[in-house]
Image (spheres, rainbow, N blue to C red):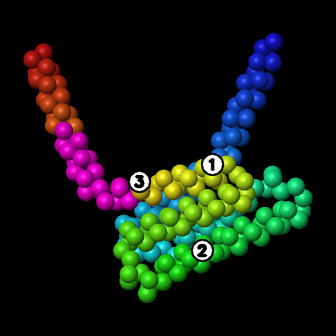
């Protein structure tokens, strides 16, 4: 009986770990995309090579998400070709956004948000072709992140002031706590 319980527990752990590992690429795409936008915004420089490396990774994630729905070799080949062409089109537009003549018309914040918008649109439209709810959810989360990211960028000074205030209050409380500890040790 104990062996059955252990086998069931290990099976559940494997399924949970397998599910977590399956969802990891989608989370990684989201984190890497947000990082690229944040880096572009704060460095005030376009990072063309970063996007040129990230897009093929997104292609692989999309292909792997649609692979189980492709029934035969022809369907899998069509999946690979359509995703490669789909993301190539978005990569071309991203590169056009990063041209020096275009950059003169956009701030770093606008460039970062435009690229984030393109990647989220590309992700969502890829999910429509793939019929993958995971890729669709990723695209929707990215799309919802656009106004949130814009708000954070516009409110960065506000957050910095709040963080400085909280740090100041914690420093004062720590100093008072430390002084009380010294006084109680001195009295003993």
Q: Is residue 9 left or right of residue 47?
A: right
Q: Which mark is residue 24?
A: 1
- Residue at point 64%, 62% (across, down): 125
- Label 2 crowding class (10 Å Cα cut-off): few <14, some 14-19, many 20+? many
Closer to the chain start, of discs 1 and 2, is 1
Of helix, strand and loop, which one carries label 3? Answer: helix
Q: CA distance from mark 1 to mark 2?
A: 23 Å
- Residue 34 drawn above or below residue 6: below
Q: CA distance from mark 3 to mark 1?
A: 23 Å
Q: Main secondary structure of the magenta part?
A: helix
Residue 5: quadrant of the picture: top right
Q: CA distance from mark 2 to mark 3?
A: 24 Å
Closer to the chain start, of discs 2 and 3, is 2
Q: Which mark is residue 148?
A: 3
Residue 151: quadrant of the picture: bottom left
- Label 3 crowding class (10 Å Cα cut-off): few <14, some 14-19, many 20+? few
- Residue 105 drawn above or below residue 80: below
Res. 141 visible in picture: yes
Res. 61 visible in picture: no
Q: Which mark is residue 91?
A: 2
In the image, the segment drawn in magenta is 148-169
Q: Position of residue 62 (x, y in %)?
A: 69, 59
Q: Position of residue 64 (x, y in %)?
A: 74, 56
In front: mark 2 or mark 3? 3
- Residue at point 81%, 67% (across, down): 78
Q: Position of residue 185 (x, y in %)?
A: 15, 21
Of residues 49 and 92, which is closer to you in this image?
92
């Amino acid at each position: 009986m104990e062996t059955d319980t252990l086998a069931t527990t290990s099976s559940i752990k494997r399924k949970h770990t397998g599910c977590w590992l399956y969802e990891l690429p989608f989370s990684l795409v989201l984190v890497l995309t947000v990082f690229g936008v944040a880096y572009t915004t704060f460095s005030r420089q376009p990072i063309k090579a970063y996007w040129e490396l990230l897009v093929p990774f997104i292609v692989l994630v999309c292909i792997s998400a649609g692979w189980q729905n492709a029934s035969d070799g022809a369907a899998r080949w069509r999946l690979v070709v359509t995703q490669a062409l789909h993301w190539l089109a978005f990569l071309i537009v991203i590169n056009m956004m990063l041209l020096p003549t275009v950059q003169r018309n956009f701030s770093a914040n606008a460039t970062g948000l435009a690229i984030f918008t393109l990647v989220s649109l590309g992700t969502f439209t890829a999910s429509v072709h793939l019929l993958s709810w995971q890729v669709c959810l990723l695209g929707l989360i990215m799309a919802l992140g656009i106004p949130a990211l814009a708000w954070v960028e516009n409110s960065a000074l506000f957050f910095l002031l709040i963080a400085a205030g909280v740090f100041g209050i914690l420093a004062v409380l720590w100093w008072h706590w430390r002084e009380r500890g010294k006084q109680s040790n001195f009295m003993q």
